[in-house]
Image (cartoon, rainbow, N blue to C red):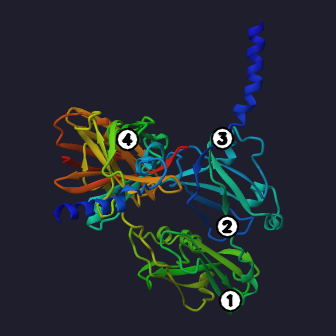
Amino acid sequence: MKKIIFTLLMIFLLAPNFMQAQPIEAGDISSIKSYPVIYAYNEQVTWTFDLSATTFSPGEDLYIWIWSPSEPDAGNWTNSSDFAKLKYEGDMRWSFTLTPTLYFSKTPAEIAASAGFWFRLKDKTGTKQSGVGNVAYTDFSAFYTANQMIKSYPEKPLVDQGVSILFNSNLVPGFVGVPSVHFHSGINNWNVLQEYQAWLPDISAKTQLKDLGNGFYKMDLIPSQYYGTPAGYVMENIVFLMVAKDWAATSPDQIIYAGEFVPPPPPEFSYFPLQISQKDFLGLIRKNNERGINKLTYTVTAGTKVITGVFSGNTAEIKGFINLVSELNGIPNLKEIHVVVKDNTNRTISDTVITLKVLD
Amino acid sequence: MKCKSIFFLAIMSLLAFGCNEIDDGSYAEPITLYEKVNGDWSLMNLKMVDEFAKTNKIKPDEQNLSTLFNYADFKINFSVNEKMNPTSYEVTGNVPPLFPPKGFWKLSSAFQPTDSSPLKIYLYNDEAKTKSIGEFRVTSVPNSNGEMEIQLVRISGGAAFISYVFKLNTIK
């Protein structure tokens, strides 16, 4: 009986501690992309989070824990609800699709007056969490009074990232009261086309702009998907005109220049130092790692002795030192070591024989 | 004549030296570097330098090992006897044996070298100090802050290819 009481006491004393246990910090979100790039608070949007710099595992079930503008999943830190679950998009990217007014049960005005979208990403039971994230919101209301016919967000789009193009039809004769407006366009000076083909219902739908009311329209697209360009296609510009249904009216020709794609620096692997003896530490350093590469596994064979281990890091750098000093201490007649280094995708990074220097 | 002049010289010598006793207090041994080097030292920083890369101007040429392999706990003691002569040394802190963790030691010079030759700490296997087991270059002699920097150099074919720089702090 005493034992039972004691056990129960321990459970009550310790349980709150377990529940309040500090989650493991998985690292910061590298970047957040919204699609559409610009959206009203009552419009559906997908936020995509790049977690390549975190220690979350590829494909892991992750959830959003958002407390501003409101906290929809309040009280469920240790058991996130399904409605807060993210979708894995591959390549260490997760997405979350929502209509802000519905998800937060707030009016657009209330959301606009709030501190913005503040959150963490976490596993279901709250043992791991990302750093605090904030989705930046682009307020485009100024366009309504800017007296500008076309405005693109971002100003210089990239081929594989979203772009939103606003159109003020009030500035073009013939658009008043038209049933729909379409995006007749191509990229690289009409090299790849997506014309407005009024007689094809699916093309009509694909090219149709979203009606924002009062003669204002918005087109959202990701060029590589919208135009079906092959991987590695270099986009220089988007050329287009806005067309009223059945070509009842057209805007003048427009051009948006693409931003310059800056390729990431190539990965760099090196040993440190360049020459070693049996009595030294051997460093492995890999910089500018590809997305998702965060571990180096090594196997050092020295005569009959085999040393293995793993070093963790992130896209910026993975670095570690192998303790040959202790591992090879006292082994006679060693002339060389065979070193094999692989990454977390089991790809061989280095497979080499290193000659050991003989000390004077 | 001959006798006279010898006598005269003897008198002169007595006058010059004989009665002049210099009072400089009791005799004291000169202060040596052993007074500064002996004692317990803890590690502030351990740096591994790629001397080959440094010579050839290749980067990176150094890495910090202070937080690895338990080096945060590294301590070394250089003992002396009552006459301030060096006796044994010992490393504590369960670190990899970059050099033998126990033995005997002495300095290359009891005083700060006046020429450009570096001050060294020689390490020996035996108390008689006949079997060398390594040496450190003292790259920074103990100063008023109680800091000393010693360098373990790996040499092959006469050329240094790696060194380990131990920045030490005296334990009071």
User: Depth check: B163 or A56 in front?
Assistant: B163
Q: Image point 51% across, 45% down: which residue?
A: A57
Q: Give the amino acid at mark 4.
A: Asn
Work out whether mark 1 precedes mark 3 in sequence or the reverse, and give the earlier one. 3
Q: Which chain is mark 2 on?
A: A
Lower sequence index among marks 3 and 2: 3
Q: Is residue A312 visible?
A: no
Q: Is residue A285 left or right of residue A226?
A: left
Question: Which residue type does callout 3 highlight?
Answer: Gly
Q: Position of residue B157 (x, y in %)?
A: 16, 54
Mark 1 on the same chain as mark 2 = yes
CA–CA distance in space, label 1 to label 2: 24 Å
Percent x, y for residue B50?
31, 57
Residue highlighted by disc 2: A136
Mark 1 to mark 3 CA distance (whole Å): 48 Å
Q: Residue at x 26, y 66 (%)?
A: B56
Q: Nearer the viewer, mark 1 or mark 2?
A: 2
Q: Which residue is mark 1?
A: A148
Residue A265 visible, this orientation: yes
Packing grade of label 4 (10 A; few <14, some 14-19, many >=20) is: some
Residue B85 badge? 4
The amino acid type, in three-letter code, at marker 2 is Ala
Q: Nearer the viewer, residue A156 or A175?
A: A156
Q: Is A297 left or right of A16, judged from the image as shown?
A: left
Name the residue at 30% across, 64% down.
B115
Quarter of the image holding residue A278? Answer: top left
Labels 4 and 2 share a subunit: no
Is residue B15 placed above or below A56 in the rendered structure?
A: below
For this rendering, which residue is in front, B140 or A270?
B140
Give the residue pinned by disc 3: A126
What element does badge 1 sit on? loop
Say above or below: A345 vs A213.
Answer: above
